[in-house]
Amino acid sequence: GAGVSQSPSNKVTEKGKDVELRCDPISGHTALYWYRQRLGQGLEFLIYFQGNSAPDKSGLPSDRFSAERTGESVSTLTIQRTQQEDSAVYLCASSKTRSGELFFGEGSRLTVL
Amino acid sequence: DQQVKQNSPSLSVQEGRISILNCDYTNSMFDYFLWYKKYPAEGPTFLISISSIKDKNEDGRFTVFLNKSAKHLSLHIVPSQPGDSAVYFCAASGGADGLTFGKGTHLIIQP
C-alpha cells in the first residue's frame, strides 16, 4: 500500500492478556516509530527503529512492552499482561530519514477492560 | 522532563482571523522542527517544517517562525478556516534521536 498500515484498528482485551499490534511502514522508509496517545493526552514516544541500528527503547513505559522490527519492514509492538492504563491509541509512523517527515498510520485503538 | 512544550492545550479563534500556535523547546541540539495536524480518529499528518538555519518558512496560509535564541517556534494560520479545527503537534529533532513531540494544542475555529 501507499501509506503506513496498522492492524488491528481496534482491539478490546481483558486485563492480564497479551496483545500484539502490527505496523507495515512505507516501503523504503528506514525510520519507524511507535507512539501512543492516551485519552486527553499528547503523543507519547515509545520506541524508535533506524535501519540496522539498535532501537531507542527509552520511551517504553515498562518491561511489559517490547517491539521488534524485521530489517526495514514490519514491526510488532507487544504488550504483555495488559493493564487498564495501557488503553490508548497506538500510532506507528515511518520516515525516509531520521529527522524527515513522519507518515503516520491511523493507529490501533486498544481498550483493556 | 518535557523537551518540547505546547503550553496551550486549546485555542479558540474566529473564522477569518489569524491562529497562532506556540511551541517551546529546551534541547539546544534540536535542529529541525515540524508541525503536525491531527483530526479525531486519524493519524497525524505533516503540515510544515523548518530547519534551524532559517527563521521563517511559508506554505500558503501556514507560516512557521523560529526564534533560536528564545528556543521558541510558532505556527501562524491566516486566514483561519473551519477545516483548520484539529489538534496541532509541534515536533523537534536533533542529534541521533528521532522526533520528540509536544502534547498538542486543540485549535477550534469558530464561525
Image (cartoon, grey):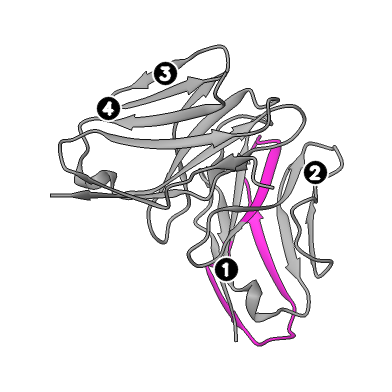
**Can you tell which quarter of the image residue B30 is in?**
top right
Mark 3, residues whose alpha carbon is within 10 Å: few (<14), some, or many (≥20)? some
Q: Residues within 10 Å of mark 4 (few under 14, many from 20)?
A: few
Residue corresponding to mark 4: B61
Q: Does the magenta portion include B17?
A: no
Q: Which region of the structure is painted magenta?
A: A7-35
Q: A6 and B53: which one is in front?
A: B53
Q: Residue at x 52, y 45 (%)?
A: A3
Question: Which mark is first along the chain, 1 or 2?
Answer: 2
Q: Is residue A113 above or below residue B1?
A: below
Q: Are marks 1 and 3 on the same chain?
A: no
In-front residue for pair B48/A20 = B48
Spatial CA span between label 4 and label 3: 11 Å
Q: What's the chain of the residue with tag 1?
A: A
Please give the label number shown on residue A71. Answer: 2
Q: Amino acid at mark 1?
A: Ala
Residue situated in front as seen by the camera: A69 or B50: B50
